Image (cartoon, rainbow, N blue to C red):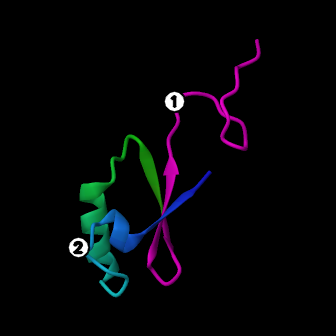
Amino acid sequence: MITEYKLTVITQGLINRNAPRSRKMEVLNAIINPTKYKFMGFGLNGSVVKLKPKFHNIRDKKGRFTCKKK
């Protein structure tokens, strides 16, 4: 399950899609918590940030909680 956020929304207007990738990554590394999200890349010409949540529990392919069968 990948979640997408607009770059200007997640950075609160600090950078836009025309900024260099290195500048985007500096700001995103300061904003995104690496223990909760994995950065997957940019979409729509760099205006969308794709993040994958890290779950410490078991989920099915639709993101619902499931139990581990013994």
Q: Quadrant of the C terminus?
A: top right
Answer above or below: position of 54 versus 45.
above
Q: Residue 23 appears in which quarter of the rendering?
A: bottom left
Q: Taken as a whole, is the magenta stretch helix, strand or loop? A: loop
Answer above or below: position of 56 versus 2.
above
Q: Secondary structure at mark 1?
A: loop
Amino acid type of disc 2?
Leu
User: x%, y% of residue 44?
Assistant: 53, 80
Answer above or below: position of 37 versus 18.
above
Counting residues from the N terminus, which is met first, the one under dot 2 or under dot 1?
2
Check disc 1: other Cα within 10 Å, few if <14, some if 14-19, many if 20+: few
User: x%, y% of residue 32?
Assistant: 33, 53
Which residues lie in the magenta part?
41-70
Q: Residue furthest bottom?
A: 18
Amino acid type of disc 1?
His
What residue lies at 31% left-to-right and 68% top-to-bottom? 25
Q: Answer whether residue 5 is magenta in the image.
A: no
What residue lies at 31% left-to-right and 73% top-to-bottom? 24
User: x%, y% of residue 66?
Assistant: 70, 26
**Is residue 26 or residue 10 the one in the foreground?**
10
Q: CA distance from mark 2 to mark 1?
A: 31 Å
What residue lies at 27% left-to-right and 67% top-to-bottom? 12
What residue lies at 28% left-to-right and 56% top-to-bottom? 31
The numbered mark at residue 14 is: 2
Check disc 2: other Cα within 10 Å, few if <14, some if 14-19, many if 20+: few
Q: Secondary structure at mark 2?
A: loop
- According to the picture, the residue beneath numbered tag 1 turns out to be 56
